[in-house]
Image (spheres, rainbow, N blue to C red):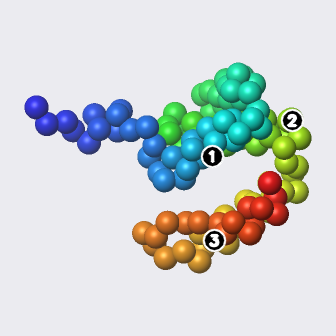
Amino acid sequence: MKKTVHEHEKDLIFSEPWQAELFALTVSLHEKGFFEWCDWTKTLGKNLKLDKGKGKDDLTRYFKNWLNALEETLLEKKVTNTKNIKIIAEAWRETISKTPHGKKVEISDAILKTIL
């Protein structure tokens, strides 16, 4: 039996490429010892609980909470600071605006090295 579009959406793990990249980045930072997984999951759980009922429950909202939890964890562990988070956010915005539609968005290693 063929699945409907709605049924396929239930099977999605990521609805946009940035979500998969955020997932991979989080796992990589954990594996490199920047934070303990249990610390990050507690922060994610707190963020999801605070956000519950504030809008549509979808993958974009979930991964925005994921990003916020990662930022909070990295700040708490003093891996980075607010200034660097703002720099990378601006670098992403600038890179996205210059990347042709359909092409992979990548920030240069030089920018990444200045903030990590």
Q: Position of residue 111 (x, y in %)?
A: 75, 67
* Secondary structure beneath label 1: helix
Residue at the image position 74 percent from the left and 61 percent from the top = 112
Q: CA distance from mark 2 to mark 1?
A: 17 Å
Q: Is residue 114 above or below residue 2?
A: below
Q: Earlier in the sequence, mark 3 or mark 1?
A: 1
Q: Nearer the viewer, mark 3 or mark 1?
A: 1
Q: Earlier in the sequence, mark 2 or mark 1?
A: 1
Image marks 2 and 1: residues in contact by CB distance under 8 Å: no
Residue hosting label 3? 95
Task: Point out which mark residue 25 bears.
Answer: 1
Other residues around mark 2 within 10 Å, as few (<14) / some (14–19) / many (≥20): few
Residue at the image position 82 percent from the left and 63 percent from the top = 114
* Secondary structure beneath label 3: helix
Is residue 90 visible in the rendered image? The answer is no
* Secondary structure beneath label 2: helix
Q: What amino acid is found at the position of numbered circle 1 in the picture?
A: Leu
